[in-house]
Image (spheres, rainbow, N blue to C red):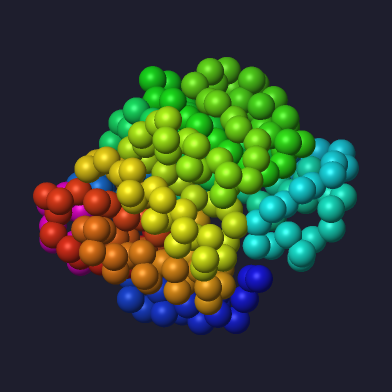
Amino acid sequence: MSDWIHTAKSLIRYKLKSVDAHGIHPPFLFRLYTEAFDDKKSYYAFDKIENERKKLLANSEIIHFNDLGAGSKLLGKERKISEIARTNLLPPKYGRLLFRLVNLFRPKNILELGTSLGITTAYLAAANHQAKIITTDGDAHVLKIAQQCWNNLKLKNIQSVNGNFDNLIPELLANHTFDMIFIDGNHTYESTMRYFRWISEKKLPQTVMIFDDIYWSKEMTKAWKEISGNKEVTLSIDIFKLGIIFFNKNLSKQHFVLKY
């Protein structure tokens, strides 16, 4: 369950600890910061994707929403698409960051856990049309709406899979290797650690993992701290909303809290 007091206190600590480019010395991280976090360019796809978000925010259609994640008991099952868009979609600035990360690292295969209405997926897919995006969600209704969004954007490199993460992840990892993974679903300590363990066992040297809502609850923060401190993780980056980890053995073990 979300813990707004924990989130608020964590935000204050983040603002006190976070640094910008002047506090960064490792060359890899400095390049990452300047080309992804501090990049102010507006890419061709941004306006088109945000126009799709506007449509969703204005859509008053009511659907049966089957949320299998940690927040499922907080909200009713019958919900307007506009409400789902308002509460579940990743804010634009973080979608743009994911786009830039894909643009910078050029991953060939991307896994997204938690499609929602497809806006984040669109940012991942639009950054590199040669990449294959596999996105999963427990709700077939929202996947159908997401597919319409991707059709409107003419994105052809997305494969959506409906089902429970605990059933899907082992099967996907048995048949694919991923060099970027975005995890935005089932925000519990046990689930997050389980997904990290499964994925890290199948990781590539260049694999990048991104976790959403690392301060959403004490459970999520506990999971993030254990993951970022894991011996297999070389570089970890905390930007409050997202946590990003690298397994590249050419990087020294470091943790940074960056302004974004």
Task: Pick whichever, 139 or 259, lies toward us.
Answer: 139
Look at the image and tell me whether residue 202 can be seen.
yes
The residue that appears at 55% across and 80% down in the rendered structure is 6
Going by the image, does 135 lie left or right of 195? right
Give the x, y percent position of residue 229: 29, 69
Residue 31 lies in the magenta-colored region: no
Magenta part, dominant SS:
helix
Q: Residue 194 location, x and y as percent?
A: 47, 58
Figure check: 95 above or below 43: below
Percent from the top left, x then y, of residue 216? 56, 68
Q: Quadrant of the C terminus?
A: bottom left
State the extent of the magenta-drawn residues as a range: 21-30
The correct choice, above or below, for 38 with respect to 204 in the image is: below
Which corner quadrant holds the N terminus? Answer: bottom right
Identify the residue at image location x=69%, y=25%. 148
* In the foreground, 14 or 190: 190
**Is there any visible trace of residue 120 in the rendered image?**
no
Residue 217: x and y in percent read: 56, 72
Q: Quadrant of residue 2?
A: bottom right
Q: Is residue 21 left or right of residue 163?
A: left
Residue sitting at 79 percent across and 61 percent down? 75
